Image: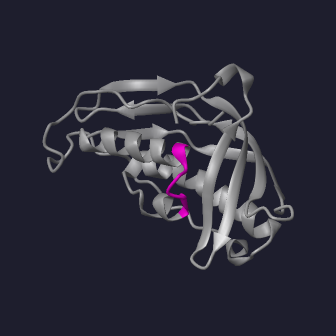
Amino acid sequence: MLVTIGIASCDGGSEDPTQTPTHPPPETRHPEPGAAIARDDEHGAEEAARYFWSLYSYAYATGDLDEWRDLSHPECATCQTVVDRVTELHDAGGHAEGGMIRLDVIEATPPGEGDLYFNVHVEGTQEPLTHIGEGGDTLAESSGTEMNADMALARDADGWLVREVANNNEEQGEADG
């Protein structure tokens, strides 16, 4: 099962993505990875997972998907779902507020013999998330959610890549990402 933390984008907003929104998003601090992300071990995998989830709410708030894409393996369905939803929201002149993810547990296991991927288990909480339309109207909102997921990460010459995110929350069921 794949986890998609957050809520789906809603239709609406401007047909012209170059139009300046009438309700600009609040200032959002760009997340930075810790030094451990340069490591090719469990500590590096844990930092890559932490950074990946810190980029989640940043991408929704700003529409900036550059680092998200840099960390996303081309075949990561959850990663692509986030790209699609963020793009849809921002192309319509909207943005998101809230949705910060706090990870309480990050535990990496190195790849087994013949395996390419570190398994990183994460548990945490996502704050309430609101999608705001171009005019400032609320398009969708969530009250926040608990997350419990396993991630498959690999490191290549360019850095860490998230290959898959598997949802361990039974109540969320299979997500569409």
In the rendered image, the vertical position of residue 42 relative to residue 143, given as above or below: below
**Residue 10: x and y, percent?**
34, 27
Q: Position of residue 115 (x, y in %)?
A: 78, 61
Q: Is residue 49 magenta?
A: no
**Place of residue 51 in the rendered image (x, y in percent of width and height, measured from the top left):** 62, 60
Q: Residue at x 51, y 46 (%)?
A: 57
Residue at 70% in and 53% down: 152
Q: Residue 73 magenta-drawn?
A: yes
Q: Which residues are magenta?
A: 71-77
Assign the N terminus to one quadrant of the image.
top right
Closer to the camera, 132 or 85? Answer: 85
**Residue 144 drawn at (x, y percent):** 60, 29
Q: Is residue 125 left or right of residue 111?
A: left
Quarter of the image holding residue 71?
A: bottom right
The type of colouring in the image is: one colour
Location of residue 1 with respect to 45 vertically, above or below: above
What residue sits 35% from the left and 25% below the top?
Answer: 139
